[in-house]
Amino acid sequence: MEAVDHLAEERNRAEFDVEEMKIVWAGSRKEFEVSDRMARLVASDPVFRKDNRGILGRKELFKNTLRKVAYAWKRIIELRLSEEEASKLRFFVDEPAFTDLHWGMFVPAIKGQGTDEQQQKWLPLAYKMQIIGCYAQTELGHGSNVQGLETTATFDHETDEFVIHSPTLTSSKWWPGGLGKISTHAVVYARLVIDGKEHGVHGKFYRPASEFDDHLPLPGITVGDIGMKFGNGANNTVDNGVLRFDHVRIPREQMLQRVLQVTREGKCVESNVPRQLIYGTMVYVRQIIVADASRALSRAVCIATRYSAVRRQFGSQDGGVETQVIDYKTQQSRLFPLLASAYAFRFVGEWLKWLYTDVTERLQANDFSTLPEVHACTAGLKSLTTSVTADAIEECRKLCGGHGYLFASGLPELFAVYAPAPTFEGDNIVLLLQVARFLMKTVSQLPSGKKPVGTTAYMGRAEHLLQCRCNVQKAEDWLNPSVVLEVFEARAARMSVARAQNLSKFANPEEGFAELSPVLVEAAVAHCQLIVVSKFFEKLQQDIPGRGETTITGSLLHICPKHSSQASW
Ligand SMILES: Cc1cc2nc3c(=O)[nH]c(=O)nc-3n(C[C@H](O)[C@H](O)[C@H](O)COP(=O)(O)OP(=O)(O)OC[C@H]3O[C@@H](n4cnc5c(N)ncnc54)[C@H](O)[C@@H]3O)c2cc1C
């Protein structure tokens, strides 16, 4: 039977310059070249094979990950890869590992919360991986409610130490990646207690295992792996762990003291470093999560699009060829918005990179004016992009029919790896409620003449947005991006203002907030969708080089879904 390369046929029909589009996606020619080089390096090395992940037993799977991580590290040193190249190489190795937490949470926590001396002491060891760290915040009893954590760090005046203790079963640290087997160190969050008085939850730097000899837990420590997780392969490559303390002592200097210090006399002293600086780390981590969302979504969409071009069902006349499923309008209406979302998330992720630099500069200059808005914006974007991506990967699986259910399609494992993203680093609903609180406050301040800033600037035009009418007469009118933008603005403003009016009818605002929370979450989603669309629009206005990119990204904008369900934003 004669083979037909359906993908080649489809590719030849592209109305834009594919090579240039690759650069638009990568961010710059240099980033594209680094990415391309690292992808080839990984693909050509048999040590990095990943086709057997789903059939390995847990122990073998875990050992396999350790081998890969060690080998990747060896290659990074041998090839003298830059930080950018090393991070791309790890991305293409494409296997969740303890290193994700070491580089993604442990190192940023020391950088963000450690004093200069603490950073000088621990960061060089962490950079060389002579110590391996994890981020131990969540407990069995509390995840989202950090103030509910029960682990205690009690100051002992006599010995100048903190005594770390897990007073209840529910105070056991539970979930931290890399904790179960591998980490030699952890940043542990605990309630600070001095002379019987509580001083809130803070980070301590702790060493759960003796790293230089037998790697067994230190006295007073119970530590282990929490067991199998969702899916084959997937996050089972990571040793998410449980950790309990029985009056374990650490020197006072091991509290991360950039913002709050405890003196030899046991006094709590706020340092002259503003507490708000910690937000810089948070923006950094969330920017990475949004970038990861666009990458995970693009992988799923790529598989589903190629499948749809190759797969044929029905429509044959007299034994002729059947119809490519990509030509069915129903397939297009499910697939193309996801493709558009992948680009939209890519561009908003790029913008978040800029925002991180902007926030860092402002914080260094003691300018905290944009922080509430930045906090709401990054919390909302983390929530929106991860929820949409998790649901979209599952939709892509269905778009590939029965074949999507096969491990070999790549989609089941991609979904299993991605599924916890809406939960970790802030549960998505809890984050949206924070966004809603910020929006309600912004609306309540409008009559005072306080100008909303940044991503809420549109609220300053609330009067117009509440009464304007859409001028669209025919379908083509939707091809005008400013029309689309105003529709999103009007929708977000109207939802926020209506919720704020309803909220004001409650005598007790907290009760009102709890009662209206389902619809407040919808207003928060609408606001976040507007941010994504507006950043997409800004990207279109930039001079994207090459033939047809502006057209293609322009048409993608118009197939971004415009309704507000969580599943398909
Ligand atoms: C794969 C994975 C890796 C992880 N890695 C780490 C790690 O490295 N370090 C670490 O410290 N932790 C880690 N975690 C834990 C993670 O941060 C928590 O699971 C997360 O914070 C959510 O907390 P929870 O599990 O207690 O859920 P809960 O907070 O109990 O949420 C349960 C449900 O209650 C809802 N809910 C909670 N509060 C409210 C509210 N106020 N209003 C309305 N609804 C609410 C939520 O929306 C959710 O639907 C990891 C988790 C996973 C799954």
Image (cartoon, rainbow, N blue to C red):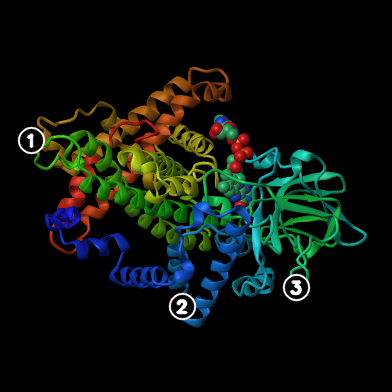
Between circles 1 and 2, the one closer to the viewer is: 1
> Residue type at mark 3?
Phe
Which image quadrant shows ligand 1?
Answer: top right
Residue 456 appears in view: no
Q: Residues within 10 Å of mark 3 (few under 14, many from 20)?
A: few
Quote the CA–CA distance across marks 3 and 2: 27 Å
In the displayed structure, does residue 68 sit left or right of residue 564?
right
Q: Quadrant of the C terminus?
A: top left
Q: Which mark is residue 212?
A: 3
Q: Position of residue 51 (x, y in %)?
A: 44, 58
Quote the CA–CA distance across marks 1 and 2: 57 Å
Q: Residues within 10 Å of mark 1 (few under 14, many from 20)?
A: few
Question: Dot 2 lies on which element?
Answer: loop
Among the two numbered marks 1 and 2 on one chain, the one whose residue lies closer to the N terminus: 2
In the displayed structure, does residue 479 sit left or right of residue 215?
left
Q: Which residue is mark 2?
A: 81
Q: Which residue is mark 1?
A: 317
